[in-house]
Amino acid sequence: MSRSPLAPVRLDRRQLLKLGLGAGAAGLLPLGSLQAGTLSTNARIVILGGGAAGMAMANRLSRRLAGASISLVEPREIHHYQPGWTLVASGVWLPDKTMRPNANFVPAGVTWVRQPALGIDAEQRRVSLADASVLEYDYLVVATGLQLNYHLIDGMSPDLVGTHGIGSVYASLEGATRTRDAIDAWIAKGSGKGIFTAAPTPVKCAGAPLKMTFTTLSRLEDTGHRDDFEVDFLAPGSALFSQPWVNDFVKQRFDDQGVNRRHHYRLSAIDPGARQAEFTFVGPDSEFTSHHELREAEFSQEGERRVIADYDFIHVVPPMSAPDFIRESDLIAREGPFRGEWLDVDIHTMQHNRYPEVFGIGDVIGAPINKTAASVKAQAPVVEANLLAQMQDQPLPARHNGYTSCPMITGIGKAMLVEFGYDNNLDFLPSFPFIDPRDESWAAWVMKDRMLQPAYYAVLEGQA
């Protein structure tokens, strides 16, 4: 089946000014304060991870610290713009648009350690690497991102994405591309059932499963034979999104577009050859925060129900957690809702709750929200200011208000710019007063499709 990406949206100067974008792409995310001045130090600083969070901190700290030894632990040569993977999987972008060499972003003076980290000894302040070498640190910034636990779904592997009607936008760039192809094949068939799922754990870009459903619905409607396709969305809880008004909107829109919603069911197994998925009823009072709980949960006879569903296409969202070597270290949360699964930090200062020389940023941290690139943008100046204060034995001056945003695609060509913070506070966070976050608009789509990527790279470079 031949296919091509949608034509790019072109804006003239008047349209840019009308949207408030003429000042440059970096203005698309709320600016944090870039503090002037440098600190002279011979401290050894290790940054674990070279994704958005780690690269942003490498650039910020390299400018603020004179004489420090800064090591960035990142084995990958290519940086992936993961917010673009939903557009790849939806057939809007070509894959190459989301890739840049990491060498473009590693600042001069920072030692790039091209090895995976395998362990952390927080007491001895040591990081062990895959080549058996060890990095000692005075200060540690944990920016590893998270781990995709496909193995917790019986029969599922990321290698299956793109085969047997299986898609998963999270798997990799190749997985997003194969997801696009699997959706193409389903549409070309002219009929059949598509199942979209959500995970019972926190996930990065919590809106991605919804975006994939909405863009696929757009494509199905464009065929002129929407009624020939059955679309189901099975969620492990009662909510589809953490922000209440967004949750209400999505539920109503799904109902309006003929999506069959089923709540309190998690994907527990998949039979690729038979194209069957097994869902387990988890009950309205069951709330899993760890993959240990998922694996070891015992359902009562009256509460356990299993549903076997046939599908022509299924979008799989795996359970997620911090990487295993973080989970197995002393840095993992020991109590509370993030115990055993996520980095133990103060969600406002970003400092570790038990090891003051350690800070966390990005998807790896235990926080009620915040697993987005926009969250990294808001967290980076907080980590920078507080780390420098810690190095000088001063009180930590900066606090993170939980800012996060989700350009919620509601169809190809329209979106909502959803912004909120801790406690779902929307009153003081909206960045663009001319865009109502509760309304779908072409302007919000243009931001997602054309403008947010340059802003993202500005964050990596520590410029925004």
Image (tube, rainbow, N blue to C red):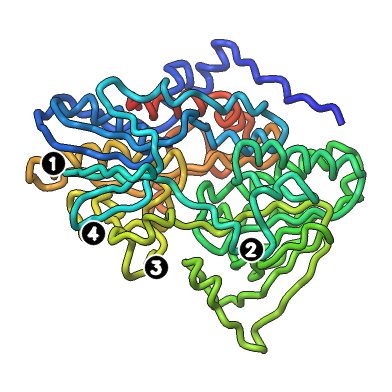
Q: Give the CA distance from mark 4 to mark 2.
A: 32 Å
Q: Which amino acid type is shown beneath numbered disc 3?
A: Pro
Disc 1: which residue: 389
Q: Give the CA distance from mark 1 to mark 4.
A: 16 Å
Q: Pointer 2: residues within 10 angstroms few (<14), some, or many (20+)?
A: many
Picture disc at residue 153 = 2
Image quadrant containing the C terminus: top left
> From the viewer's perspective, is 61 left or right of 375?
left
Position of 323 relative to 79 (above/below): below
Q: Which amino acid type is shown beneath numbered disc 2?
A: Ile
- Residue 423 visible, this angle: no
Disc 4: which residue: 353
> From the viewer's perspective, is 320 left or right of 325?
right
Residue 206 horizontal/vertical position (percent): 54, 51
Residue 383 horizontal/vertical position (percent): 26, 41
Picture disc at residue 271 = none
Q: Give the CA distance from mark 2 to mark 1.
A: 44 Å
Picture disc at residue 337 = 3
- Residue 7 visible, this angle: yes
Q: Give the CA distance from mark 2 to mark 3.
A: 22 Å
Q: Which sits earlier in the primary sequence, circle 4 or circle 2? A: 2
User: In terms of depth relative to the viewer, which is nearer, 386 or 271?
Assistant: 271
Q: Which sits earlier in the primary sequence, circle 1 or circle 4? A: 4
Position of 375 relative to 304 (above/below): above
Marks 4, 2: nearer the viewer: 2
Q: Which amino acid type is shown beneath numbered disc 4?
A: Asn
